[in-house]
Image (cartoon, helix red, strand yellow):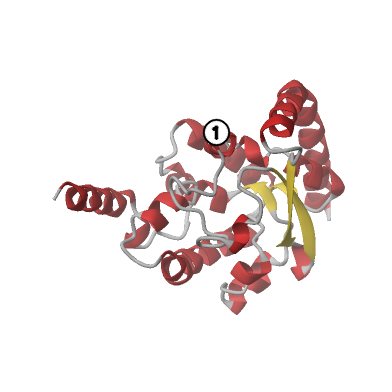
Protein backbone atom coordinates (compact mmCIF):
# COMPACT_ATOMS: atom_id res chain seq x y z
CA UNK A 1 0.00 0.00 0.00
CA UNK A 2 2.78 2.41 0.94
CA UNK A 3 4.65 1.78 -2.31
CA UNK A 4 1.42 2.29 -4.28
CA UNK A 5 0.76 5.66 -2.62
CA UNK A 6 4.38 6.74 -3.13
CA UNK A 7 4.32 5.71 -6.80
CA UNK A 8 1.03 7.54 -7.49
CA UNK A 9 2.21 10.67 -5.67
CA UNK A 10 5.43 10.65 -7.67
CA UNK A 11 3.50 10.12 -10.91
CA UNK A 12 1.32 13.18 -10.30
CA UNK A 13 4.22 15.39 -9.20
CA UNK A 14 6.49 14.30 -12.06
CA UNK A 15 3.84 14.56 -14.78
CA UNK A 16 2.48 17.92 -13.61
CA UNK A 17 5.96 19.42 -13.23
CA UNK A 18 7.19 18.16 -16.60
CA UNK A 19 4.04 19.33 -18.38
CA UNK A 20 4.51 22.78 -16.88
CA UNK A 21 8.18 22.92 -17.87
CA UNK A 22 7.62 21.78 -21.44
CA UNK A 23 4.36 23.67 -22.01
CA UNK A 24 5.98 26.17 -24.45
CA UNK A 25 7.43 23.30 -26.51
CA UNK A 26 4.16 21.36 -26.19
CA UNK A 27 2.18 24.29 -27.59
CA UNK A 28 4.73 24.84 -30.38
CA UNK A 29 4.40 21.21 -31.49
CA UNK A 30 0.61 21.55 -31.41
CA UNK A 31 0.84 24.63 -33.63
CA UNK A 32 3.19 22.93 -36.11
CA UNK A 33 0.91 19.89 -36.34
CA UNK A 34 -2.15 22.09 -36.78
CA UNK A 35 -0.47 23.56 -39.85
CA UNK A 36 1.19 20.46 -41.29
CA UNK A 37 -1.33 17.73 -40.42
CA UNK A 38 -4.56 19.50 -41.38
CA UNK A 39 -5.55 20.13 -37.78
CA UNK A 40 -4.95 16.59 -36.52
CA UNK A 41 -2.69 17.22 -33.53
CA UNK A 42 -3.28 14.15 -31.37
CA UNK A 43 -3.51 10.46 -32.15
CA UNK A 44 -5.67 8.29 -29.92
CA UNK A 45 -5.55 4.51 -29.73
CA UNK A 46 -6.85 1.79 -27.42
CA UNK A 47 -4.10 0.12 -25.39
CA UNK A 48 -4.13 -2.56 -22.70
CA UNK A 49 -3.94 -1.19 -19.15
CA UNK A 50 -3.72 -2.57 -15.63
CA UNK A 51 -5.91 -5.60 -15.05
CA UNK A 52 -6.34 -6.08 -18.78
CA UNK A 53 -8.62 -3.04 -19.03
CA UNK A 54 -8.21 -0.99 -22.22
CA UNK A 55 -7.69 2.76 -22.11
CA UNK A 56 -7.27 5.54 -24.66
CA UNK A 57 -3.63 6.56 -25.09
CA UNK A 58 -2.57 10.06 -26.19
CA UNK A 59 0.23 10.73 -28.68
CA UNK A 60 1.19 13.47 -31.07
CA UNK A 61 0.27 12.61 -34.66
CA UNK A 62 3.33 11.25 -36.47
CA UNK A 63 1.90 9.05 -39.23
CA UNK A 64 -0.52 9.46 -42.11
CA UNK A 65 -4.18 8.92 -41.28
CA UNK A 66 -5.22 5.27 -41.29
CA UNK A 67 -1.60 4.08 -41.06
CA UNK A 68 -2.51 1.15 -38.80
CA UNK A 69 -4.39 -0.38 -41.75
CA UNK A 70 -1.49 0.12 -44.16
CA UNK A 71 1.90 -1.52 -44.63
CA UNK A 72 2.92 -3.57 -41.59
CA UNK A 73 0.10 -2.31 -39.37
CA UNK A 74 1.28 -1.48 -35.85
CA UNK A 75 4.88 -2.40 -36.71
CA UNK A 76 7.03 0.55 -37.79
CA UNK A 77 10.13 0.05 -39.93
CA UNK A 78 13.12 2.33 -40.34
CA UNK A 79 12.28 5.10 -42.84
CA UNK A 80 8.67 3.90 -42.83
CA UNK A 81 6.84 5.78 -45.60
CA UNK A 82 3.80 6.22 -43.34
CA UNK A 83 5.72 8.48 -40.93
CA UNK A 84 5.39 12.17 -41.78
CA UNK A 85 8.35 14.55 -42.01
CA UNK A 86 7.49 16.23 -38.70
CA UNK A 87 6.56 12.85 -37.25
CA UNK A 88 10.04 11.51 -37.96
CA UNK A 89 11.59 14.26 -35.82
CA UNK A 90 9.07 13.72 -33.03
CA UNK A 91 9.65 9.97 -33.01
CA UNK A 92 13.43 10.27 -33.10
CA UNK A 93 13.39 12.60 -30.09
CA UNK A 94 10.51 10.70 -28.41
CA UNK A 95 8.57 13.97 -28.18
CA UNK A 96 5.60 12.17 -29.70
CA UNK A 97 5.15 10.38 -26.36
CA UNK A 98 4.81 13.56 -24.26
CA UNK A 99 0.98 13.74 -24.43
CA UNK A 100 0.95 10.53 -22.39
CA UNK A 101 1.72 12.73 -19.39
CA UNK A 102 -2.02 13.42 -19.56
CA UNK A 103 -2.64 9.67 -19.26
CA UNK A 104 -0.37 9.66 -16.21
CA UNK A 105 -2.33 12.48 -14.56
CA UNK A 106 -5.60 10.70 -15.34
CA UNK A 107 -4.32 7.55 -13.66
CA UNK A 108 -4.32 5.38 -16.79
CA UNK A 109 -0.53 5.11 -16.71
CA UNK A 110 2.48 5.56 -14.45
CA UNK A 111 5.72 7.33 -15.28
CA UNK A 112 7.49 3.95 -15.20
CA UNK A 113 5.95 0.64 -16.16
CA UNK A 114 5.52 -1.84 -19.02
CA UNK A 115 4.81 -0.16 -22.35
CA UNK A 116 1.09 -0.43 -23.20
CA UNK A 117 0.35 -2.43 -26.34
CA UNK A 118 -2.66 -2.65 -28.61
CA UNK A 119 -4.84 -5.69 -27.75
CA UNK A 120 -3.73 -7.64 -30.84
CA UNK A 121 -0.04 -7.35 -29.90
CA UNK A 122 -0.69 -7.94 -26.19
CA UNK A 123 -2.30 -11.25 -27.16
CA UNK A 124 1.11 -12.52 -28.35
CA UNK A 125 2.46 -12.48 -24.79
CA UNK A 126 2.60 -15.75 -22.88
CA UNK A 127 -0.15 -16.26 -20.30
CA UNK A 128 2.47 -15.93 -17.56
CA UNK A 129 3.65 -12.59 -18.94
CA UNK A 130 0.08 -11.30 -19.37
CA UNK A 131 -0.72 -12.12 -15.75
CA UNK A 132 2.42 -10.40 -14.41
CA UNK A 133 2.12 -7.32 -16.63
CA UNK A 134 -1.54 -6.91 -15.73
CA UNK A 135 -0.63 -6.34 -12.08
CA UNK A 136 0.94 -2.92 -12.73
CA UNK A 137 0.00 0.21 -14.65
CA UNK A 138 1.64 0.67 -18.04
CA UNK A 139 4.35 3.32 -18.15
CA UNK A 140 5.50 6.33 -20.11
CA UNK A 141 8.90 4.67 -19.98
CA UNK A 142 10.33 1.52 -18.48
CA UNK A 143 12.66 -1.42 -19.00
CA UNK A 144 10.90 -2.36 -22.22
CA UNK A 145 11.11 1.19 -23.58
CA UNK A 146 14.87 1.24 -23.00
CA UNK A 147 15.63 -2.23 -24.35
CA UNK A 148 13.44 -1.83 -27.44
CA UNK A 149 14.29 1.77 -28.26
CA UNK A 150 15.81 0.60 -31.58
CA UNK A 151 13.13 -1.99 -32.28
CA UNK A 152 12.44 -0.63 -35.77
CA UNK A 153 16.06 -1.27 -36.80
CA UNK A 154 15.91 -4.93 -35.76
CA UNK A 155 12.61 -5.45 -37.57
CA UNK A 156 13.87 -3.66 -40.69
CA UNK A 157 17.15 -5.57 -41.01
CA UNK A 158 16.03 -8.96 -39.69
CA UNK A 159 16.01 -10.52 -43.13
CA UNK A 160 12.60 -11.95 -42.24
CA UNK A 161 8.99 -10.97 -42.76
CA UNK A 162 8.53 -8.11 -40.23
CA UNK A 163 5.35 -9.40 -38.59
CA UNK A 164 6.82 -12.88 -38.09
CA UNK A 165 10.07 -11.52 -36.63
CA UNK A 166 8.07 -9.29 -34.28
CA UNK A 167 5.85 -12.15 -33.15
CA UNK A 168 8.47 -14.90 -32.88
CA UNK A 169 11.56 -13.00 -31.68
CA UNK A 170 10.62 -9.62 -30.23
CA UNK A 171 7.40 -10.43 -28.39
CA UNK A 172 8.70 -13.40 -26.32
CA UNK A 173 11.66 -11.35 -25.08
CA UNK A 174 9.56 -8.24 -24.57
CA UNK A 175 7.25 -10.35 -22.41
CA UNK A 176 10.22 -11.50 -20.30
CA UNK A 177 11.46 -7.93 -19.85
CA UNK A 178 8.07 -6.52 -18.83
CA UNK A 179 7.45 -9.51 -16.56
CA UNK A 180 10.82 -8.81 -14.90
CA UNK A 181 9.73 -5.23 -14.20
CA UNK A 182 6.42 -6.35 -12.73
CA UNK A 183 8.27 -8.65 -10.33
CA UNK A 184 11.03 -6.19 -9.36
CA UNK A 185 9.44 -2.75 -9.45
CA UNK A 186 10.03 -0.37 -6.56
CA UNK A 187 10.71 3.34 -6.17
CA UNK A 188 14.51 3.03 -6.43
CA UNK A 189 14.33 0.88 -9.56
CA UNK A 190 11.88 3.37 -11.09
CA UNK A 191 14.33 6.22 -10.51
CA UNK A 192 17.11 4.15 -12.12
CA UNK A 193 14.93 3.48 -15.16
CA UNK A 194 14.07 7.17 -15.54
CA UNK A 195 17.78 7.99 -15.48
CA UNK A 196 18.54 5.21 -17.98
CA UNK A 197 15.80 6.59 -20.24
CA UNK A 198 17.58 9.95 -20.35
CA UNK A 199 20.89 8.21 -21.12
CA UNK A 200 19.24 6.16 -23.89
CA UNK A 201 18.08 9.29 -25.71
CA UNK A 202 21.71 10.40 -25.98
CA UNK A 203 23.29 6.94 -26.26
CA UNK A 204 20.58 4.59 -27.62
CA UNK A 205 22.84 1.54 -27.97
CA UNK A 206 23.94 1.48 -24.33
CA UNK A 207 23.50 -1.77 -22.41
CA UNK A 208 23.43 -0.26 -18.91
CA UNK A 209 20.05 -1.76 -18.10
CA UNK A 210 21.68 -5.20 -18.22
CA UNK A 211 24.49 -4.04 -15.93
CA UNK A 212 22.47 -2.04 -13.40
CA UNK A 213 19.96 -4.75 -12.58
CA UNK A 214 20.71 -8.26 -11.38
CA UNK A 215 18.89 -11.14 -13.04
CA UNK A 216 17.75 -8.94 -15.95
CA UNK A 217 16.68 -11.21 -18.85
CA UNK A 218 19.58 -11.62 -21.32
CA UNK A 219 18.98 -10.63 -24.93
CA UNK A 220 18.52 -13.39 -27.50
CA UNK A 221 21.21 -13.31 -30.19
CA UNK A 222 18.81 -11.82 -32.76
CA UNK A 223 18.32 -8.76 -30.56
CA UNK A 224 21.98 -7.97 -29.88
CA UNK A 225 23.69 -5.00 -31.53
CA UNK A 226 26.43 -7.29 -32.82
CA UNK A 227 23.82 -9.26 -34.74
CA UNK A 228 22.15 -6.06 -35.95
CA UNK A 229 25.42 -4.63 -37.28
CA UNK A 230 26.09 -7.86 -39.17
CA UNK A 231 22.60 -7.76 -40.69
CA UNK A 232 22.99 -4.11 -41.72
CA UNK A 233 26.38 -4.78 -43.34
CA UNK A 234 24.93 -7.76 -45.19
CA UNK A 235 22.00 -5.68 -46.44
CA UNK A 236 24.28 -2.85 -47.57
CA UNK A 237 26.57 -5.35 -49.29
CA UNK A 238 23.67 -6.83 -51.23
CA UNK A 239 22.60 -3.34 -52.26
CA UNK A 240 26.03 -2.67 -53.78
CA UNK A 241 26.11 -5.85 -55.84
Residue 93 appears in which quarter of the rendering?
A: top right
Crowding near pointer 1: few (<14 within 10 Å), some, many (20+)? some
* On screen, residue 136 above or below 51: above
Of residues 148 and 197, the one nearer the viewer is 148
Q: Secondary structure at mark 1?
A: helix
Left or right of 209, for residue 11: right
Location of residue 182 in the rendering, given as x and y in whole percent from the top left corner: 64, 61
Q: Which residue is farthest bottom?
A: 127
Of residues 202 and 24, the one nearer the viewer is 24
Location of residue 120 in the rendering, given as x and y in whole percent from the top left corner: 63, 71
Q: Can you identify the residue that label 1 sits on?
A: 89
Residue 197 appears in which quarter of the rendering?
A: top right
Location of residue 103 in the rendering, given as x and y in whole percent from the top left corner: 79, 47
Q: Residue at x 64, y 72 (%)?
A: 130
Q: How many marks?
A: 1
Q: Residue at x 75, y 69 (%)?
A: 52
Query: Can the viewer see residue 135 in this picture?
Result: yes
Left or right of 15, for residue 164: left
Location of residue 74 in the rendering, given as x and y in whole percent from the top left corner: 57, 60
Query: Can the viewer see residue 6 in this picture?
Result: no
Left or right of 117, for residue 145: left
Q: Residue at x 55, y 33 (%)?
A: 89
* On screen, residue 231 above or below 95: below
Q: Which residue is farthest front?
A: 38
Q: Residue at x 42, y 64 (%)?
A: 162
Q: Which residue is farthest left?
A: 241
Of residues 89 and 151, the one nearer the viewer is 89
* On screen, residue 209 above or below 29: below
Amino acid sequence: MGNTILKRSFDILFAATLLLLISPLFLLICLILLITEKGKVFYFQDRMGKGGKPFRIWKFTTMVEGSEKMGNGTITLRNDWRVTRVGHILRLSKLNEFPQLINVLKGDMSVVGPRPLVPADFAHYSEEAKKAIGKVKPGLTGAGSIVFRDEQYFVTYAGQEPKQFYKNIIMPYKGEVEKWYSEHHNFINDLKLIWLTAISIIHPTNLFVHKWFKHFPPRPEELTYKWLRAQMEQTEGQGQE
